[in-house]
Amino acid sequence: MQEKLRALDLRYQALEAQLSAPETYQDPDLVAKLNREQRELEPVVTAHRSLERARRDMAEAEEMTGDPELSEMAREEFARAKGEAERLEQELKILLLPKDPNDHKNVVLEIRAGVGGEEAALFAHSLHRMYAMYAERRGWKVDVVNLSETELGGVKELSAVVEGEGAYSRLKFESGVHRVQRVPETESGGRIHTSTATVAVLPELEEVDVHLDPADIEMQVFRSSGAGGQHVNKTSSAVRLIHKPTGTVVECQQERSQFQNRDKAMRILASKLYEAEQERVNQEFESQRRSQVGSGMRNERIRTYNFPQGRVTDHRIGLTLYKLDAVMDGDLDELIDALITADQAERLKAGEQD
């Protein structure tokens, strides 16, 4: 590990030198690439340098223990530096875990009403609101590209692109079946109903990330559907793409121009085909855990939102929080941080067993 850390430190120094050279800024794409690499290395290099400093403090304190007048102070300093070194060693083990290559990407978020009729659609709408508010807290942008609503304002299905630093690294843990237990707005008898909605989180990919043969794609254009009246687009600007080899269908109708809708639909299609290929590979290795906490399969219930008791429970890690209102208003960090910590612990354990 020490050799790897020293090599990363040297690479960080090289990046600093390159970014300080005026000629580097003649190539904006190179600058963006170097800055991204520097940001990724910075936490590791900072922790490594702090660890080296703590180890030097330990060595100096050990030398002073032979002096009767300084021995007590030296022992205290040694204990402090040792504790800091142990903490930093553990932090570095986590920082050096293999990174998901998609963590820096934007997200294609899909929400669909599941079991429960109109109440499931209303819950899907609540989930969309929750993620939109969470994105706002993180400084991300949410762009809805396809939306099918019910008469009461529920969401049958929705596709959106979430753009922002680290969006996929945090939202990827949200894939799965979300269950709600509450008295529906449509229920006059006051009985608690259980409904579900499914959430899919895909890394947004460009066409260059996934090879798309134009001959395999059929494009259809149609008029956008909406709430009616002035909301309906009178021109055929909505786009439906059909990937003929797999039967995958993607629609985009939120933009005003056919070109914009096609561009977004192509990126979503690339993301869906990438995910399908990943699923195929994962199925060949059923005995291995997937990269997300738990198996991450969409047909598994991952979380329950119980409104009468004001609690939310994540079943993958057994975490229950009695702050449902805050969670539904986008306060998801405590849940997501716990999932990330559990994922890191699982991967550390797997690494120690290898």
Image (spheres, rainbow, N blue to C red):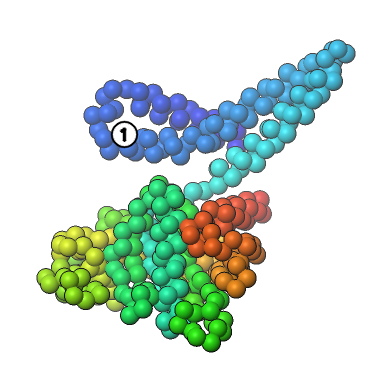
Question: What is the count of numbered marks?
Answer: 1
- In x, y percent, where is residue 40? 46, 39
Quadrant of res 262: bottom left
Q: Is residue 274 above or below residue 89?
A: below
Q: In the rendered image, is residue 283 in sight? A: no
- Which residue is more in the foreground, 193 or 198? 193
Residue at the (48%, 58%) spot, across then down? 330
Instruction: Classify mark 1: residues with Cα within 10 Å, few (<14), some (14-19) or many (20+).
Output: some
Left or right: residue 127 versus residue 88 is left
Residue 196 at what x, y percent from top left?
49, 77
Image quadrant occupied by the N terminus: top right
Residue farthest along the left direction in this orientation = 235
Q: Which residue is mark 1?
A: 31
Tell me: 196 left or right of 64. Answer: left
Q: Residue furthest front?
A: 188
The residue tagged with tag 1: helix, strand or loop? Answer: helix
Relative to 187, is 202 on the left or the right?
left
Q: Nearer the viewer, residue 98 or 110?
A: 110
Specify whether residue 331 is in view.
yes
Instruction: Identify the residue at horizontal 34%, vertical 57% (top origin).
Output: 142
